[in-house]
Image (cartoon, grey):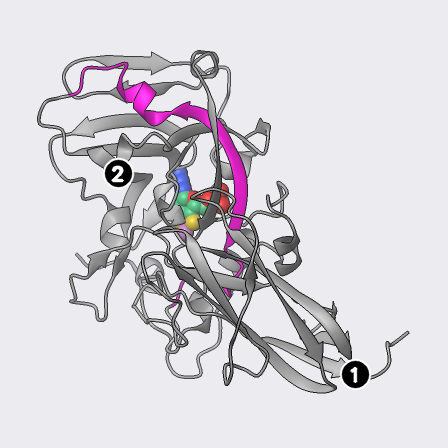
Amino acid sequence: MSLPTWQDRAAARVAEPGEGISRDELALAARNHAMPAEALRWDVTPVGLHYVLVHYDIPAVDAATWRLRVDGGAGSVVDLSLADLEAMPRSTERVTLECAGNGRALLEPRPVSQPWLTGAVGTADWTGVRLVDLLDRVDLRPDAVDVVFRGADHGTERGEEQDYARALPLDEARRPDVLVATEMNGVPLPVQHGFPARLVVPGWYGMAHVKWLTGIEVLDHTFDGFQHRAYRLRQHADDQGVPVTRMLPRALIQPPGYPDFMTRERNLPAGPVRLTGRAWSGRGEVTRVEVSTDDGTTWREAELGPSAGPHAWRSFGIDWDAAPGDHRLRARAGDDTGAVQPLEPAWSRGGFANNGDDAVPVHVHLMPRG
Ligand SMILES: Nc1nc2c(c(=O)[nH]1)N[C@H]1C(S)=C(S)[C@@H](COP(=O)(O)O)O[C@H]1N2
Ligand SMILES: [Mo]
């Protein structure tokens, strides 16, 4: 099948050397906002500052008529209203969520898509019903393999028309911390985050956390929807690749001092300063963060804050005696599986799961400026 030119133009590709960010990419970047780096100061990202990614349009969902259909594949189906869902036992998980494409625009060559720097991350307290409790309300087919989650949003992507949909293997879906969430930080889900209900899969990259849920269905085979064929780590167009699943370790520094409007580079008075930040991993507990103030030439071990649970980022801090001059701050995290954040990000055609860091340029000067 050959695509119409307007879709062909948007097909997954890699930018030519020196090719700038296009109007299409700017339009995506303006819709899908990052978390401002200064929001790293909070354990829980305030609603509105959490990053947002929406593939198509935010759908119009009427809470009064909304239904969630759960189909176990063995003939039994439950059809729940929002009030039905809210009447079930509820639990809360603190979860750091990161888009699989976070850092994509820093890659060389640059995959053409939502051009994230490193801000596609946030942490929220998600409250809702455990998915396993919903699955327990229907008869599961004995040959169950995958559980598919469908969203109310609709669009085309590389020529394929679809409702956004993703699946989980049955054993992941039955994990007790996987939620169908109806609240974020104690308020009803904001519309851009999936009102009235979304899936939350602690530890996994963002694409698995299906928003605007309408249906949950148990399948006797592996789901092969577009969003599974797209989210794979591939080196070239014919590479089959491997699926994108859990978040790799990553650390971000909260930029010290004050910024320049245009460059966002930092100004800082000389002298002792505490550098802080947050680090996360979807594979294990963060056990180590190292910080460099000389662009990665030398590294020092940071102090870790208390663990905030298995799925939320962990704070770190280190004292620095800032000498006058120009410096580049970097951080790298490691987790208890032994995985360590690389100094050079791993490249893939989609720019997924590239857990590189981004240096924070700081100009240290002798006198505080007025
Ligand atoms: N229905 C639906 N769910 C979705 C998406 C979407 O476009 N539609 N985007 C996914 C992606 S790629 C990410 S990174 C997260 C973003 O969640 P947030 O906007 O709440 O931060 O939602 C995921 N769930
Ligand atoms: Mo994403």
Range shown magenta: 112-140
Q: Which residue is mark 1?
A: 365
Percent of width and height locating residue 232: 25, 57
Which of the 4 quarters of the picture holds residue 323? bottom right
Q: Residue at x 31, y 68 (%)?
A: 13
Mark 1 vs ligand 1: CB below 8 Å: no
Outermost right residue: 370
> In the rendering, which numbered label is found on residue 197?
none
Amino acid type, mark 2: Ala
> In the rendering, which numbered label is found on residue 167?
2
SS of the residue at dot 2?
Answer: strand
Q: Is residue 333 above or below residue 120?
A: below
Callout 1–callout 2 Cβ contact below 8 Å: no
Near mark 2 (Cα within 10 A), the count class, few <14, some 14-19 or many ≥20, is many
Residue 55: in sight, yes or no?
no
Image quarter where ligand 1 lies: top left
Q: Earlier in the sequence, mark 1 or mark 2?
A: 2
Q: Please indicate whether residue 59 sits to the left or right of residue 50 in the image.
A: left
SS of the residue at dot 1?
Answer: strand
In this orientation, which residue lies closer to the viewer: 241 or 172? 172
Which is closer to the viewer, label 1 or label 2? 1
Q: Quadrant of the N terminus?
A: bottom left
Q: Please indicate whether residue 360 sits to the left or right of residue 55 in the image.
A: right
On whether residue 120 falls in the magenta region, the answer is yes
Q: Please indicate whether residue 282 sits to the left or right of residue 240 in the image.
A: right
On whether residue 347 falls in the magenta region, the answer is no
Percent of width and height locating residue 151: 37, 34
Amino acid type, mark 1: His
In this orientation, which residue lies closer to the viewer: 297 or 148? 297
Q: Quadrant of the C terminus?
A: bottom right
Percent of width and height locating residue 303: 56, 62
